[in-house]
Amino acid sequence: MLYVVGDQQDLHFAQCFKILSLLEDCPFDASEKLEHINFGRVKGMATRSGDVVFLKQILDTSQETMMKQMKASPERFAAIEDPEHTSDQIGMTAVKVQDMQAKRIMSYPFDWNRMTSFEGDTGPYLQYAHVRLCSMERKVAVEDGLTIASLELIDTSLLLSTPKAREIVFYLATFPDVVKTALKTQEPSNLVTYCFKLAHLISSAWETIVVKGLMGRGERGLAEARLLLYRPTHDLFRSLFYKSPDMFAELSEIAQLYASGLAAILGDEVSRVAKALIKIPHDGPHDLTLAVSELGPVLNNENPSNIAAKVAENYPSDELIQAVEASDSLLKFYIHSAPMMHQVLGMIYAKSRSPGPGYGTNTLGNGKRVVIEFSSPEIGKPFQEDHLRSTIIGTALSNLYAANGWDVIRLNYLGDGGTERALLAIWFKEFKEERPQEAEEQLQKNPIFFLNSVLLVAAHDFKANRGKPKLDTIAKINDHYKLLEDANSDPTAMLNHFRELSISQYTKIYKRLGVQFDVYAGSLLVSGESIKQVMHKLRQQGLLVGESTGNFQRPTRAAPQVEELEGKNNHGDTRAGDLALNIDLNEFHLGEPLLQEPGGRTTEIVRDIAEAIDRYHKYHFDKMLYVGGGQQTVRFARCFKILSLLGDCPFDASEKLEHINFGRFKGQVDPRWDEGKLVFLDWLMDWAKDKVMEKIKASTERLPTIGDIEGTSDQIGMTAIKVQDMQARRSVISSPLQFMRSTVIYRSIPYTFDWDKMTSFEGDTGPYLQYAHVQLCSLERNADGLAISSSSLESIDTSLLQSTPNAREIVFLLATFPDVVRTALKTHEPNTLVTYCFKLARLVNSARETIVITGLVDCGEKKLAEARLLLYICARNVLGSAMRMLSLTPLERM
């Protein structure tokens, strides 16, 4: 349920939703089902005389303005059949477009003159563009006798001679994605922007892609192709030029066969359009559907329900296509089970035995490279919840990109700079001078734990100090930053030593989690020269606040104190002097981020920018993802915007960079510590392992079958943590960002960290997935001596599976796996894959009572036993593949 109300009601709805979530017997999850769709205000909405008005007055004034403009062209006005209605429609379009043109969360000025103009990006301009297209089609029909009769006879290759034509067609092909994005972001402005761009493209094509007069020169083929390009029916454009990737080979081919079967009943033109519109339903006994009403103009104004009934009555069946039914205007297609099962199971088994890419993978990303930055713990501090979620989600996304054919660079950008690290270095040096042996022993024994202890003491003392002691520490921090400019200085060497020790410790944790990195980066490794170049470019473009025509002026904001530098990386002096430099991003609702502190120390965002440019030069990526918590949204939004403002940035930041954000989890992470305290990740993993081991040991029947109870418990514990994390959707952030008084409004989806549920073997949990995979492996081991090989695959009669409805349902779900992999990548949502795993596990679990293998061979039903064994082997292969994509290690015994 959505509440579309202004942003002044943000607090009201947040309070309402929170109270609902606290009600124990609330019949729904408020955080999942309720959402406030907020928006900014309209500034200056008034009549031309300046009075505040009601909506009717606004619409009436708009109509009067448009009528006046129409009458200014007597020739055009005479051609309008209903001037009152036309002016009213254009006036309403003007009001609506001006409102939707603005990003939802932004306030915008109500501008009468601009809104009612036929020039520029306005509602009247959109109406004019559409009218012009319709007029052109009418004129060539009357004057040249040119109409679109048969699509099959039109040679669209003739359009290739005009680059603009290809650009228009390609842009038309993006319309389905624009619609999906507009819904996903709940931003009508996405669709408005698309309309304007399409109108601009067509307007710029009038002079070069001419239709009128071609018939007289004997170029009918070219005239028809161009008319088809201009024809104002997007569904027809899409059916001709837009081709989405096949969901999976077998069912895609069957869909094409269905479409071809329509040709004999409704003609070739319908068949061609239908290929793009046949879909796989979410539920129901039918396999594919076609909404006849979506066929559009090719129906020739016939009733869709009548056409659906005609198709159902006359559609020919064959060995692959079983039947077609009509339900109003919806056609439902049924596939013969035997050939479908044979194809799907045969492909899964063959790919599982081949050395090449497995079933479910694809080559869509071949030749493309993605850099994924994730995990990013801070030196001297334990993993916090954001680092854990980033590690889990980032690993899954890395695997999904690899499964879709991308070359993946896994990068860990360690937090090794900032004021905290300066304090750490200062206090460790003093501690080591007093107790050198103890300091080194503790550092080698457990570097992260020891450094965190030193940091906690240092931070506490720094905050508690007053007067001269505090000023002395600040002076030491400033000296520390200056020394960091020298790569061979003691502070630099010390932090690099901390960094290497931390990486060695992290590597052990990552190995246990099944995570690997190609690169360990960090602010210490950002090139000082690159930082200077970024600041130089910003200065040259006049983007720095406080600099004007070469004369520096102090910014209006006060210079921040040392306490404000928390989390910033500050080494590197780009310009000496007591000057703070900002960049004004207020027009993008991103405030004025500080780029350089007084004294010349640059902040974290400058390093982010320099590092992004250096990475592009090094890796030549097609895309780079930053997997970080929702509280990092402003940081990355500012970074991306500044990169887009740099005149000679070597890549388009808006196209190639993306922040993959996520919400936080709620609840007590570890029952042995109070909520809110920092918990080391290895402690967390140990606790999960212990919980699982308790449950395994409680089963005296299961315990003797496990060879390595420690390793098994650890893997199930890891799976429990990861699955609970990925089962929750990532956070959804308001778009665009609302940046007001340093406050960002997030729409996030947190989840509750629940130990009992997470480690349970019942319900949708990680242990349940492991149990389902183990059961499938056990079925194969205990299959009455049966074995399946590639050479015996063709002899297996999969048609014997038809007698059990569950078997067909399992095979059909297996067939959808490739599409699930693509969808999970497209949405950057690992939970799509987790949901698929649970559904498959439940289907297989419910089938084990009816699709039995044990005893069939003794009863003389070896063929049936082989078919059922193949079904279970394929289910195990797909479940295992999906789990590995999620960075889980599928167990074979439990």
Image: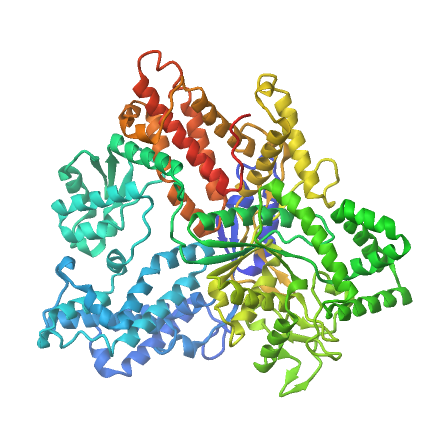
Classify 563 as above or below 381: below
Q: Residue at x 86, y 57 (%)?
A: 461
Left or right: residue 281 versus residue 304 is right
The quarter of the rendered structure image containing the C terminus is top right
Residue sitting nearer the eye, 327 or 724: 724
Query: Do we see residue 725 in this rendering?
Result: yes
Residue at position x 15%, y 42% in the image = 310
User: Which image quarter: residue 794?
Assistant: top left
* Residue 293 in the image, given as x and y percentages of width and height: 24, 49
Residue 413 location (% of width, % of height): 62, 57
The answer to whether 23 is drawn above or below residue 89 in the figure is above
**Residue drawn at the location 38% of the way across and 24% of the way down:** 787
74 to 777, vertically: above or below: below
Quarter-of-image position of residue 532: bottom right
* Residue at the outermost top position: 859
Relative to 669, 52 lies left or right: left
Image coordinates of residue 625 in percent, x first then y, are: 53, 57
Q: Is residue 41 visible?
A: no
454 relative to 348 in the view: left or right: right
Q: Nearer the viewer, residue 611 or 191?
A: 611
In which quarter of the view is residue 213 placed? Answer: bottom left
Where is residue 190 drawn, in percent x and y? 42, 63
Q: Nearer the viewer, residue 82 or 369?
A: 369
The structure's colour scheme is rainbow
